[in-house]
Amino acid sequence: EKRTPFSYNIDTKFDRTEGILETIVGYSGSSNPTEYTNPTYKSIHDYAESIRITFDCNKVSYENVLDMFFAFHTPANPSWAGTQYRSAIFVYNKEQRLLA
């Protein structure tokens, strides 16, 4: 598990929710992940800080996870944050994309 300053304890907010099985904070979304491997806070290239949330859909719905995300998330101003703090939701299927 990689820890990043991004988390601001957002992972613990999700972890306290029944049905959230796991959260992993790290980096994702590089335009060239084969060239820029193993990003760090000081060498992030064009990755964004991210959180992966695994949940039990029998205990918490995807819609509830989205509601929590938007309640916890404060979008950064791109003029000072660059790409590191950009907002994105990565989905597993078409249904999730439509709901997000």
Image (tube, grey):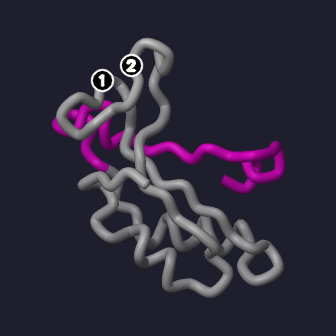
**What is the crowding at mark 1: few (fewer than 14 residues within 10 Å), some, or many (at least 20)?**
some
Point out residue 23 in the picture as x, y percentages from the top left corner: 52, 64
**Tag nearer the camera, 2 or 1:** 2
What secondary structure predominates along the stretch shown in magenta?
loop
Judged left or right of residue 57, residue 50 is left
Query: Mark 2 belongs to which amino acid?
Result: Tyr
Would you say residue 37 sits in the magenta stretch? no
Query: Mark 1 belongs to which amino acid?
Result: His
Which residue is depicted at the point 27% across and 37% down? 40
> Helix or strand or loop: what does disc 1 sit on?
loop
> As rendered, which of 61 and 26 lies closer to the eye?
26
Where, by quadrant of the figure, is residue 66 drawn? bottom right
Q: Give, as a single range, the part of the protein colored magenta.
A: 76-100
Where, by quadrant of the figure, is residue 10 drawn? bottom left
**What is the crowding at mark 2: few (fewer than 14 residues within 10 Å), some, or many (at least 20)?**
some
The label on residue 45 is 1
Judged left or right of residue 17, residue 5 is left
Would you say residue 93 sits in the magenta stretch? yes
Judged left or right of residue 43, residue 73 is right
Q: Quadrant of the N terminus?
A: bottom left
Contact check, label 2 and label 1, Cβ < 8 Å: yes
The label on residue 36 is 2
> Helix or strand or loop: what does disc 2 sit on?
loop
Point out residue 88 in the picture as x, y percentages from the top left corner: 50, 43
Which residue is depicted at the point 28% across and 65% down? 8
Point out residue 43 in the picture as x, y percentages from the top left corner: 23, 29
